[in-house]
Amino acid sequence: MHPVALHSRVACRVRIWTGLQRLLERRADGAAVLAYHGVVPRGRDPMLDSYTIDADAFRSHLRFFGGAREVVPLRRIVECLAHREPMPREWVAITLDDALENQVTTAAEILADAGFPWALAVPAGLIDTGRSIWTYELRFLLLECWRHPRVSWPSDGPRELPTRTVVEKREALRQLIPHLFNQVDDGKRTTYLERLIDRAGRAEFRERMAADARFTLASWAQLWTLRAAGVELLSHGWHHRPQNATIGEQALVEEIVHSRRLMGERLGEAPAGFALPHGVKSPATDDLIDAAGYSYCLSSQPRRVTTGGHRGHIPRFAAEYPLTVLRRHVLRR
C-alpha cells in the first residue's frame, strides 16, 4: 500500500477510536448521496480495479448504513429539495453508475438482501451492443490485449508512447485518457479507439472483454426486471461521452434527449433523473436536461445535499473506499 494511503487509513481509524468521527457525524448538515461502480473481485491491476469495490467491502458499507444511517430512495431526497424541506443527516441514498452486469446481479442481490432502495444510471445507447464505456475499453485494450511496442498519440503528429511493459502501458494510459477526455473531439476520440481495436484484433478484444466480464453491460431484459422490482433507473447518457468542450451539438442531444427517449421506449417509463457522465457539464447541458423532461440531475461534486440545494446539480460522493475512509469522506464541506 502507498505510504500516503496507509497514513490516510490510519488517520481515519484514529478518528473513529477516539470518538471524533461520531461527534463530527452528529454535527453534519444534510444527506449523502453515494455513487458506486463495479462490484467485482479486486487485485488484478490497479487501473482495471479503478472505480470498483469487492462484494465483502460493499456488504460492510451496507451493514454500517443499516445500523447507523437510514437508507432512503433517491427520489425522497429529490422531493425534499423540491419542497425545500430539511433532510436528516442520517439519510443516505445509494446510486450505481454504468449499468454493468455485475451491478444487476451481484450488487442487486446484496442490496436486496439488505432491503435497501437504490438507483442505477444507464448509458442507454450502449445497451445490447456488445460494447462498453470508452474508458473501460481503452484501459482493457492496452493492459490486456495490446502486444505492440508503441501506441500512437491521438492528435496529429508522429508522437508515439512506449507500451513494451505493463509499467509503460499504465503510463501511456495516464497520458492518453486525460488528453482524449479534454482535448479530442468525440468523433475523433471514437475513430482513434476503433483504430486501436482493429490493430489489436477486434475479435480477440471483444472475446476477452466478454470473458473478463467486469466491464460487460447489462441487457435491456435485465434492466426491465430491475425496474419491475422497484429499482429507479436514471439516464447516464448515450455513449457516456464527457459533456465538455470536446462534444458536438448533435452528440450532446443524443446523450441527453435521445437516451431518455430510448429508455422510455424500451422500459415503458422515461427516467426522471440524469446522472452526468464523468460528472461534467457543457454550457448547453442544463437547458437540454430541462427541455428533455428530466426533473433532476446528479453531479460528481463531493458534498452533502442540503436544504436550498438545486435539483439540477445534486452532489454525490464516490464511495469505493474502505468504510473508515468513506465515513470521513462524506463529511467534506
Image (cartoon, rainbow, N blue to C red):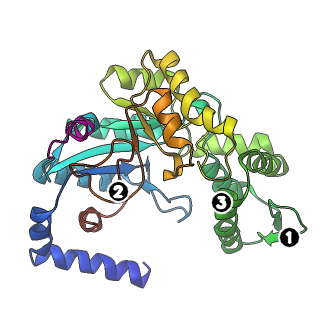
- Residue under the point 48% across and 45% down: 276
Q: In this picture, is 161 found above or below 271?
A: below
Q: Earlier in the sequence, mark 3 or mark 1?
A: 1
Label number found at residue 13: none
Which amino acid type is marked by label 3?
Answer: Asn
Q: In this picture, is 99 found above or below 179?
A: above
Residue 86 in the figure: left or right of residue 223: left
- Residue 317, picture quadrant: bottom left
Q: Percent x, y for residue 110?
A: 29, 40
Label 2 – label 3 distance at C-alpha: 25 Å
Label number found at residue 182: 3
Residue segment shown in magenta: 76-86
Q: Percent x, y for residue 23?
A: 9, 69
Residue at label 2? Answer: 319
* Disc 2: CA contacts within 10 A as few (<14), some (14-19) or many (>=20): many
Asked whether the beta carbons under mark 2 and mark 3 sit within 8 Å of each other, the answer is: no
- Residue under the point 70% across and 53% down: 141
Closer to the camera in the image, 24 or 14: 24
Residue at label 1? Answer: 159
Q: In this picture, is 172 found above or below 189?
A: below
Which amino acid type is marked by label 2?
Answer: Ala
Residue 108 in the figure: left or right of residue 117: right
Nearer the observer, disc 3 or disc 1? 3
Q: Is residue 131 magenta?
A: no
Quarter of the image that includes the N terminus: bottom left
